[in-house]
Image (cartoon, rainbow, N blue to C red):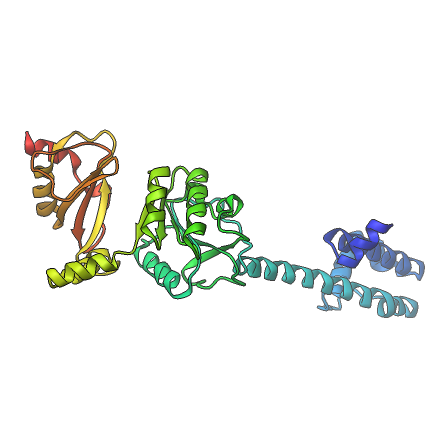
Amino acid sequence: MRRFYVALAELTWGAIAALSFGHLAVSWLLLAIVGESDFVSRPVDFVYYYIVTATTVGYGDLSPQTGAGRLVAAFFVLPGAIAIFTAVLGKLLAAVSNTWRGRMKGLGNFSDRADHDVVMGWQEATTRRLLGLIHRERRDGEAVTVLIAKDLEQNPAPENVDYVRVDRLADPAGLERAGAVNARSIIVRGVSDDETLAAALVASATCPRAHVVAYFDFESTASILRQQNSRIESVTSLSSELMVRAARDPGTSVVANLLLSAGKDDTAFSVRVPEGAAAFPYEAALRLMRRRHAVTLVGMNRHGNVDLNCHEGTEIQSGDVLFYIADHRLDPGAIAWDAFAKESA
């Protein structure tokens, strides 16, 4: 009885079902007692009459014919059925609303998402711009970015991202809800370098497939992380370096801005040479990438070693990453990798 009282007080689906069945049965019994045998004797017709009454549609094709039957309908069937129907409708609307509001408040679960970007941490203008740039890079059909943050009442950018709220940034459960295990990349920027360091290490350990990028204010912290985990790409501000370079070589800052800004022409991109592709010299790729795809090859990355001034005879192998400058990102499947080896033969 105590459990039933709690269920009734919380208006659970079980309590609503019990009330509905009980009221339906009592309504049938009372109408049968007062002699409404016209439709009470036909179960399908009675259920139809009950539902039409509960929903206030009132077709009028079935109704009590005796005075006592009409009193039962007026003072028991009608108010009880309408009350139960209203409770069901309210429960359904509340469930839909709570589901939607739960996602807005960061309570959603996106663990089935894959090949998407995950952003950890929130610093108003900085993160909002970051999310905007990621959104501009996202192709049609790609999964929506997931933001993991704390102390946010609701999704700060619902037009661009889904939101997962956590109590602390270095939370494996939050990464799981964000689908980070199958994510393409994870970008970490906490309120402090200590928070960023902890979150980046947890993300790398929890999500071995994803490429983790962490931003630090201090180079010393970034250097520690590089020594601890070479898989995590540590980034620090290059403002001082850019200022010096711009002073010595005017226009350098403009070049850097173009190369790193999404949505602008002449942006730097990368593409990985697929597994099974035949080895080819850098010179062949340099020439054919320009001729066939109108892009400029600028360097390569092998096992974390980046070379932006490759020798023409350097042999490119499967798994190497090529950097190029273009107006848009190339589809790796559209590149005829075998032609590079044939060109050099």
Q: Which residue is drawn at 81% across and 64% down?
A: 80
Q: x and y percent of residue 151 in the render?
A: 53, 60
The one nearer the camera, 204 or 317, is 204
Q: In this rendering, is residue 122 above or below 235?
A: below
Q: x and y percent of residue 217 in the render?
A: 35, 55
Q: x and y percent of residue 118 in the render?
A: 41, 50
Answer yes or no: is residue 315 visible. yes
Q: Residue at x 49, y 51 (%)?
A: 169
Q: In this rendering, is residue 296 above or below 154?
A: above
Q: x and y percent of residue 23 in the render?
A: 83, 58
User: Taking 288 as reference, is 53 left or right?
Assistant: right
Answer yes or no: is residue 330 visible. no
Q: In this rendering, is residue 339 above or below 100?
A: above
Count of marks overlaid on the render: 0
User: Taking 341 as reference, is 329 left or right?
Assistant: right
The one nearer the camera, 116 or 222, is 222
Res 189 → quadrant: bottom left
In the rendered image, the quadrant that contains the C terminus is top left
The one nearer the camera, 204 or 116, is 204
User: Taking 35 as reference, is 284 left or right?
Assistant: left
